[in-house]
Amino acid sequence: MRTTGMKRSLAALAAFAAVSGCTAHAVDAQGKKPPVRIDGSLAPAPGAKGEDDKPAAPSKGPDDKSGSAGKGKGDKPAAVPAEVLWSSGDRGDDVRKAQARLHQVAWLITPPTGTYDARTVEAVKGFQGKRGLPRTGELDTVTWRRLRKMTHEPADWELYPYGGQPAAKPDPRCMTGRVLCVNKTSRTLRWMIDGRTVSEMDVRFGSQYTPTREGVFSVYFKSRHHVSTIYHTSMPYAMFFSGGQAVHYSPDFAARGYYGASHGCVNVRDEGKVAALFAQVRTGDKVVVYW
């Protein structure tokens, strides 16, 4: 009987608690009551992290490549290929300068042409292979950096060792009359009549030991089949303007380009052009040699 009465008392107490919304609280080790969620479960203590506090991991499907992009073997970033600056078929002054540098290190034997041809491709491949770079034959930023480090800025004569450099602006003294206008900087000769350019041609000059004189002169003697009495060399189409110095055709210039020099004369590389010039120039015509 007593047991039955006790059960009834506990049941009544539970009903009263349910109606009043109260819950039974446990206490922690310090005697404090932990917070309770509205559903009656215990909430974690402040600062503690439970399973519910972990951020949900993003789901990954079979096509999900996040986190692996740009990585190769061993999770290392994939190498970015060097930018190609010039390659087969390209043309221009930059290509000519690159060819001159390749010539300096003896990978390109032929003179610069300004065209990225098959010989240039092979020269670049050789240079790259010697230095452990990919043998692409293309001048990329890495190859160009190595080449620049090993060479110097090409001089004009290195860029145009066999001629072809654009003619310089005529000197004011060349703008009147009939003039052989010779510029040492561009290494060109303009045949001019009353300020008009009739023809242009590549020329070379004497070395530092036998320099070509500068100034204003005039043609005082012409000799079609001249032979030097000092050096005993052929001087075809010679037009003398200062002592033994003359404008004339040079087979050595045609063969060696600017890798050689005259004994002070103005050498012309193109025999056809100097032959036409010889036919037009008269004794007394002006000659201007300047930088």
Image (cartoon, rainbow, N blue to C red):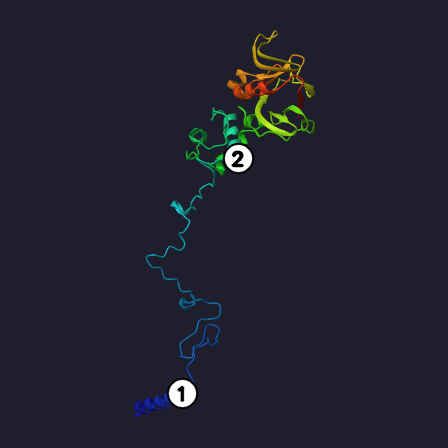
Along the viewing direction, whichever of 284 and 6 lies nearer the viewer: 284
Q: Which residue is mark 2?
A: 94
Residue 4 higher or lower than 199, as above or below: below
Instruction: Give residue 121's mark.
Output: none
Along the viewing direction, whichever of 49 and 174 lies nearer the viewer: 174
Question: What amino acid is labelled 1 in the image?
Answer: Ala
- Percent position (x, y) of residue 127? 46, 29
Residue 284 higher or lower than 156, as above or below: above
Cα–Cα gap, marks 1 and 2:
93 Å
In this rendering, would 215 be left or right of 65? right
- Percent position (x, y) of residue 24? 41, 81
Mark 2, residues whose alpha carbon is within 10 Å: few (<14), some, or many (≥20)?
Answer: some
- For the C terminus, the image quarter is top right
Q: Which residue is mark 1?
A: 17
Question: What amino acid is labelled 2 in the image?
Answer: Asp
Residue 200 higher or lower than 32, as above or below: above
In this rendering, would 207 be left or right of 45? right
Secondary structure at badge 2 equals helix
In this rendering, would 17 be left or right of 3? right
- Percent position (x, y) of residue 7? 32, 89
Along the viewing direction, whichever of 152 and 77 lies nearer the viewer: 152
- For the N terminus, the image quarter is bottom left
Q: Nearer the viewer, mark 1 or mark 2?
A: 2
Secondary structure at badge 1 equals helix
- Percent position (x, y) of residue 155? 58, 27
Residue 6 higher or lower than 147, as above or below: below
**Image quadrant where residue 269 sits:** top right
Mark 1, residues whose alpha carbon is within 10 Å: few (<14), some, or many (≥20)?
Answer: few
Q: Earlier in the sequence, mark 1 or mark 2?
A: 1
